[in-house]
Amino acid sequence: MSPGGKLKAAIAAGKFFVTAEITPRLTTNADELLHQAEPLRDRVVAVNVTDGAGARVTMSSLAASALLQQNGIEPILQMTCRDRNRIAISADLIGAAAFGIENVLVLTGDNPGAGDEPEAKGVFDFQASDIMALARRMSEQGEIGSGRKLSYRPSFIVGGVDAPFDPPADWRPDKLTARADLGMQFIQTQFCYDPAVTARYVARLEQYGLLERVALIIGVGPIASLRSAQWMHENLFGVSIPDAVMQRLQAADDEAAEGHRICVELINTYRNMSGVAGVHIMAPAQSSERIADVIDAAFAA
C-alpha cells in the first residue's frame, strides 16, 4: 500500500471505516510514542496526531507522524494555523511529503491563552481554507504559494473539521461547500453523542450534494465518567451530550463501562446511517487501549 493509501482507498471504496486520534506525550522518546499508537495498528485506517491540542506543548505533529509512517502506522498529520506563518506551513507540507505523509487535517488551533504557554503569540497568518488551497496547489500544480515549482509533486488528501448541529430550516452548508471547492476531501467532526441531531445534519449535507464530494467521518469516544461528560457538555465547543446519556452514566455502577457501551452503540448507529463514511474515535486523557477495546467490541462477530 502506497503512503496515504489506506485512507484514500477506504474513502474510494465507500465502505465504513475507522480513524482514531492520539495526542503525543511530552517526551523525546520515540518508543513512547510508538507504544502509545501500537494498539491502533490494524484496527484503524489512519491515526490522527494532534498539533498542540489545547495549545499545550507536545512532540510536534510532523515528527510524530513521521515516526508512525516509518513504523507502518498510517498517520493523519494535523496542522493548525495558530503556530506557523505561510513559510513554515509550506515547509512542513514539503517535509511531510518527503516522509511519505499524504493525509493532512487542517484546523485553526486553540487559542494560546488556554494552554500551558499563555503568553505565546498566535500566528494565524493563514486560515484553514488557505492551507487547503496551498496543499491542493502543491498536489495539482506542483508549486508553492509564490509560484515556485517543486521538483517533485506531492499527492495530499486534505481534511477539515466541523461540529454537527441541528440545522435550522434555512441553513445551507456553504462554508463546507467552499472548502470542498478548495480541495477538502474529508471531514472529521467533533464528538456527536446525539444520533438524531447528527442524522438531520447529515441529511442536510446530502441534500446539497456535499457528501458526493467529501467523506464525512463522525467523531465519537468512550466517556470516562459522568463528570467527564458534564465537563465536555459545558466546555467543549460543538459538543452537546443528551440528558439520556447523562442519566445512563449517573445510574451506572461502573461509569467507565457504561461510557464504553454508549460509544459502541454510537459506532453501530453511525455504521448504518446513510451518508456517514466512518467514525473518528477520540479519547483525550485516556489510553489508546480504550479506543482499541471499543473498536473490538463494535466490530465483534
Image (tube, grey):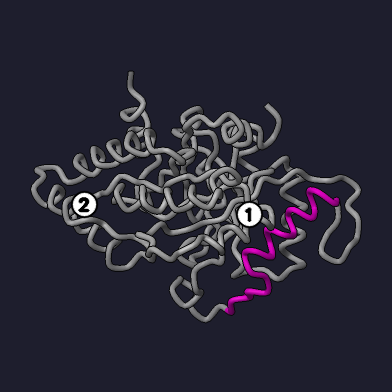
Distance CA(mark 1)–CA(mark 2): 37 Å
Query: Quarter-wise, where is residue 13 in the image?
Result: top right
Q: Is residue 139 magenta?
A: yes
Magenta region: 121-141
Along the viewing direction, whichever of 91 and 207 lies nearer the viewer = 207
Query: Quarter-wise, where is residue 263 in the image?
Result: top left
The number of numbered discs placed on residues in the rendered structure image is 2
Q: Is residue 181 above or below residue 76?
A: below
Residue at 43% in and 46% down: 218
Specify whether residue 215 is in view: yes
Label 1, on which residue? 180
State the image coordinates of residue 195 (x, y, percent, origin top left): 31, 47
Three-letter amino acid code at the position of disc 2: Ser
Q: Is residue 1 above or below residue 280?
A: above
Residue at 45% in and 41% down: 276
Label 2, on which residue? 225
Earlier sequence position, callout 1 versus callout 2: 1
